[in-house]
Amino acid sequence: MLDPSLEPQKILAVDDNTYTLRIVQHTLEHAGFQVLTAVSGKEALNLINRHGMPHLAIVDWHMPGMSGIEFWYAVREFSDMPVVMLTAVATEEDIVRTIETYAEDYIVKPFSPAELVARIKRVLRRMGDYSYT
């Protein structure tokens, strides 16, 4: 049996823009993470039900059907999994409110791959080995 400490950390990436989703997936997989992807909040919740709770979710704020904030509320009903918000539209007020209220961090599109990986690693370090299942 494989030592669980050697298994890659699982990240759930949620964005209705498939181009952005592919960039996030490729970047995080290259950094050693296991990445699950979803194009909607509803699909992301279904992935959690099928594959278990990831270590972290990176979620687009503005998505049709279920926004990133609505996804955060849905997840909070059963988990304290950290969520990092991702968006192209951001005012300083949005960023501050989101970090103070909802998310562990906030990434503005466009982003550099190095910034994405650094922010994800920082949140995971801060959260430690806590189990979100």
Image (cartoon, rainbow, N blue to C red):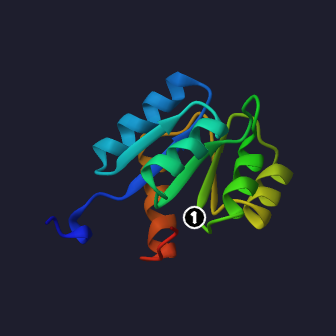
Q: Nearer the viewer, residue 105 or 91?
A: 105
In front of the other: 121 or 35: 35
Estimate the x, y position of residue 105 in percent, counting from the top left. 63, 59
Q: Is residue 58 left or right of residue 97?
A: left
* Disc 1: which residue: 81
Q: Relative to 59, is 120 on the left or the right?
A: left
Q: Residue furthest left?
A: 1
On screen, 100 above or below 58? below
For the N terminus, give its image quadrant.
bottom left
Is 4 placed left or right of 94 in the picture?
Answer: left
Position of residue 61 measured from the top left corner of the image (x, y, whole percent): 72, 41
Report the residue at 79% width, 59% height from top: 96
| Residue at 66% across, 57% down | 75
Q: Position of residue 103 (x, y in %)?
A: 68, 59
**Residue 23 or residue 65, whichever sits in front:** 65
User: Mark 1 falls on what kind of element?
Assistant: loop
Identify the residue at horizontal 25%, vertical 71% (top origin): 5
Dot 1, how many residues are within 10 Å of its Cα: few (below 14), some (14-19), or many (20+)?
A: many
The answer to whether residue 61 is left or right of residue 6 is right
Q: Amino acid at mark 1?
A: Met
Which residue ends up furthest to the right in the rendered image?
A: 93
Q: How many marks?
A: 1
